Each structure stands twice: as C-alpha cells, then as structure tokens.
Amino acid sequence: MRAFSVALLVGLLVSPALATQDKVDLTWKPKVGETKKYKLEVNMSLDLGGQTGDIKVSMINVNKTTKIDGDKVTTEGSIEKFTMAFNGNEADPSQAGGPDPSDVKTIQVRSLKTGEVLSTETTGTGEVPPQNPRIEAMGFFWRPDVQAKVGDSWTKELKKDEKKGTEASTAKFTAAGEEVVLGKKCWKVTYAYTETGIEKPFGATGTFWIDQADGTPVKYEANYENVVFQEGLPPTSAKVSMVLVS
C-alpha cells in the first residue's frame, strides 16, 4: 500500500509537468522598436521561349515593430541587398533598369492574434519587385484558434478574394515537435497548402520553425508547385527559404 501511495504521489507531481511540455505556444509576442532581418532566397527553373534558365532571387527583408495598439500591430518593412542570378550570373536588377526596392518603406497593420495583414501602404521613390498575392498567401503562417499540443493539426480554409487577388485555398498545419535552430528553441510546424476550385492550383509543402520565446519565425523552407511568380512568366516549381539573420 505504501509503495502504491508513493507511486501515485510521483505520478501527480510529474504528470502536470509533462502535460505542460506537450503544449505548443505559438502566440505572437512583438515588442515596439524591435527589428528582425530575414534572408529570403527563391530558386527556380524557367523555360523562357525555348531557353531554359536557372533563376535565383535573394534579398534581406527588414521588419520593425513601430506600434502596438490593442489587437493591431504596425510594422515598417524594407528590402536590402536585392539580387538576381540567371544561370549563375548575378546582377543587381536596379543597375540593369529593374526595380530598386531600397528606398521603399512598407507600412503594414497586422492582427496581433493571427498576424493577418489588415492594411498596407508604401512610401519612398523606389520600386518594389512585382509580387503575386497568390504567392504571398502560400507562405502565410496561420496560428491555431485553440491551444495545440505536439502532434496536433489545424486547418485554415479561405474563400476567393477578388479584391486581394487570391484564390480559395486550404492550408493544413501540424505541430511536429521541438528543434533548436540558430541557438533558439523552436516549435517545428509542417504544412501543406493548395488552392481550390481552379484548374491549375498553386501548391506548397514546407516547414516553419517558430521561436518559442516570441512566436516569430526563425526559419522557413518550402517547395512551391505550379506557381506563376510574375504575369507573363510560365508556371514553375521553386524552392523557397527564409532564415533569421539578425
């Protein structure tokens, strides 16, 4: 009887701790004045009128939190070191008559709960690279509506939005576990995304590594399928990566 009591007591003490470890807290915790820089790389192959080329796009995305007002977070974004390489030959697009994003600031207001963009405006005299809103939707991290545990999955379904230029889509996320990335304890979340209701949907599979300290991405890797990066270009597949650099 005494042995049973001791075992029961140990179980009562240990079980809550184990349960806490299983909980996956993906809450976004931004701080006013904090700046994060991410290196974004896109690698793809395109058939341009019979000429096949390997294209690599690289840039540093800079995001600074400037204001938090209730459930609204205002961020200021900019792009640094924007380069493009064709078959290994790297060039600065701004020096070749292409877009120069270095003088552009993007002000966005986001939902603190979901991270969803509520409004966007740009300032400056430069020009940002053309962006397809359907591609931006592919790499969005949707947090769960309820407390998740390791092994749990959650799904986000969106309707077609003609104003935003996005198609109906479904994204499924799974809390795969914990990993240390760049010295930071992260939650590893895998996902699969597909547009729905159209003949040639964009699709993606990949992984987010989310900092356990503040709920922000530390690393992102994905394979994109059947995507059109810019109007006039053919559909292609691509490998996309983003990593925190500072």
Image (cartoon, rainbow, N blue to C red):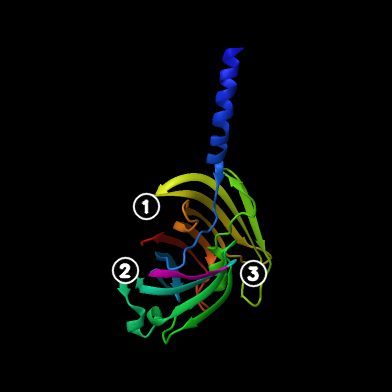
In the image, residue 69 sits, relative to residue 113, either above or below, namely: below
Residue 221: numbered disc: none
- Magenta run includes residue 35: no
Question: Reading the chain from its start, which is encountered first: label 1 or label 2?
Answer: 2
Residue designated by label 1: 182
Q: From the viewer's perspective, is the residue at label 1 or at label 2 nearer?
A: 1
Q: Nearer the viewer, residue 209 or 5?
A: 5
Q: Residue at x 61, y 65 (%)?
A: 201
Amino acid of disc 2: Gly
Residue designated by label 2: 88
Q: Residue at x 57, y 26 (%)?
A: 11
Residue designated by label 3: 167
Q: Is residue 97 left or right of residue 147?
A: left
Q: Nearer the viewer, residue 139 or 66?
A: 66
Q: Quadrant of residue 166?
A: bottom right
Q: Secondary structure at mark 1?
A: loop
Q: Residue at x 58, y 56 (%)?
A: 143
Q: Which residues are magenta?
A: 59-69
Amino acid of disc 3: Glu
